[in-house]
Image (spheres, grey):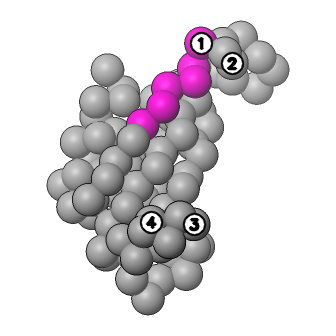
Amino acid sequence: MTAQLIKQLLTEALAPQTLEIIDNSAAHAGHAGNRGGGHYHVTIVSPQFEGKSMVQRHQMIYQALGDLMKQQIHALGINALTPSEETKGN
């Protein structure tokens, strides 16, 4: 399962305090441009995001997922927070 692999890779790379993965693939099956691969939304809270811009955080996630972004993941929504941002409700 791709969601399990996403969880494993992000956990190993970013040691998140919170990690939620939502698989929206069924809602997008067969739409134009989708040549396979799933649609996922990730909410991740990691102390490793401290001092990083949103772009840098996304790059860290893409790097952790590596080749999954080429085949198994067609679309990825990301909500990447630091622990202090999560407690503020951002």
Instruction: Return the x and y of residue 89 as percentages of the image width and height.
Output: 53, 64
Which residue position holds label 4? 86
Q: In the image as oriented, which residue stretches furthest toward the right?
A: 32
| Label 2–label 3 contact, CB within 8 A | no
Name the quadrant containing residue 61. bottom left
Q: Decide if residue 82 is in sight here.
A: no
Which residue position holds label 2? 28
Q: Which residues are magenta?
A: 21-26
Which numbered disc, 4 or 2, marks the residue closer to the eye? 4
Which numbered disc, 1 or 3, marks the residue closer to the eye? 3
Residue name at image x 29 percent, y 40 percent: 7
Q: Decide if residue 65 is in sight here.
A: yes
Residue name at image x 48 percent, y 31 percent: 22
Q: Earlier in the sequence, mark 2 or mark 3?
A: 2
| Label 1–label 2 contact, CB within 8 A | yes
Q: Is residue 23 magenta?
A: yes
| Label 4–label 3 contact, CB within 8 A | yes
Q: Which label is found at residue 54?
A: none
- Per the image, label 3 sits on a secondary structure element best described as loop
The quarter of the image holding the N terminus is top left
Which residue position holds label 1? 26
Residue name at image x 58 percent, y 30 percent: 39
Residue type highlighted by circle 4: Glu
Q: Earlier in the sequence, mark 4 or mark 2?
A: 2
Instruction: Return the x and y of residue 21 as percentages of the image width and height.
Output: 42, 37
